[in-house]
Image: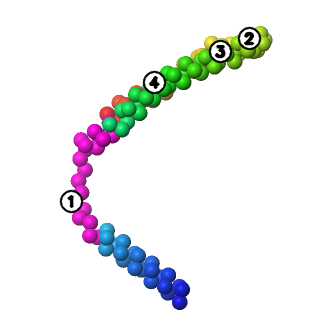
Amino acid sequence: MKKISGKLKQIITSATVFVMLASININAVSFNEGQAKSDLSSIIDPILRVGTWLCFGVAAIAVVFSFITWAMKDTDEREKSPFTKSVTSIVTGLIMVGIGLMAVRWFVF
């Protein structure tokens, strides 16, 4: 009996979903490309602006933190890993993130 009631519920649910989907007028749905670009622009533009300033701030904090940790090391350790190597990797990361943000701005808008 439980199997029959379970199957009956599935049939009723499937029929209900089918009727609901069949009743939607597909021709009435349209896509406004200009409005979509405008909506996307209003969402992504503030994110990109904040992201640009945020990546510069994070890079500056990373350079300061890297200098502090480098200054705490012994002389031998300082010679093995110079401070300029850390700064070079941080600046390279900053440039890559900046290029990514520019690419998003160019391709989305």
Q: Closer to the camera: disc 3 or disc 1?
A: 3
Kind of residue at badge 2? Glu
Q: Is residue 29 magenta?
A: yes
Q: Residue, x 23% and y 47% (percent of image)?
A: 32
Q: Which residue is mark 4?
A: 53
Q: Are marks 3 and 4 in contact (CB under 8 Å)?
A: no
- C-alpha distance separating marks 4 and 1: 43 Å
Asked if labels 2 and 3 touch by Cβ distance under 8 angstroms, the answer is no
Assess disc 1: are there few (<14), some (14-19) or many (≥20) residues with their C-alpha within 10 Å of its C-alpha: few
Compare marks 4 and 2 and give the one earlier in the sequence. Answer: 4
Q: Quadrant of residue 39?
A: top left
Which badge, 4 or 1, comes first in the chain's sequence? 1
Q: Residues within 10 Å of mark 2 (few under 14, many from 20)?
A: few
The kind of residue tagged 4 is Trp
State left or right for residue 91 relative to residue 84: left
Nearest to N terminus: mark 3 or mark 4:
4
Q: Residues within 10 Å of mark 3 (few under 14, many from 20)?
A: some
Q: Which residues are magenta?
A: 22-41
Q: Amino acid at mark 3?
A: Phe
Between disc 3 and disc 1, whose residue precedes? 1
- Residues at circles 4 and 1 in contact by the CB criterion of under 8 Å: no
Residue picked out by circle 2: 79
Q: Residue furthest left?
A: 28
Cβ atoms under marks 4 and 2 closer than 8 Å: no
What residue sits 73% from the left and 15% below the top?
72
Report which residue position mark 1 lands on: 28
Q: Secondary structure at mark 1?
A: helix
Label 3, label 2: how far apart the Cα atoms are = 14 Å
Neighbours of disc 4 within 10 Å: few (<14), some (14-19), many (20+): few
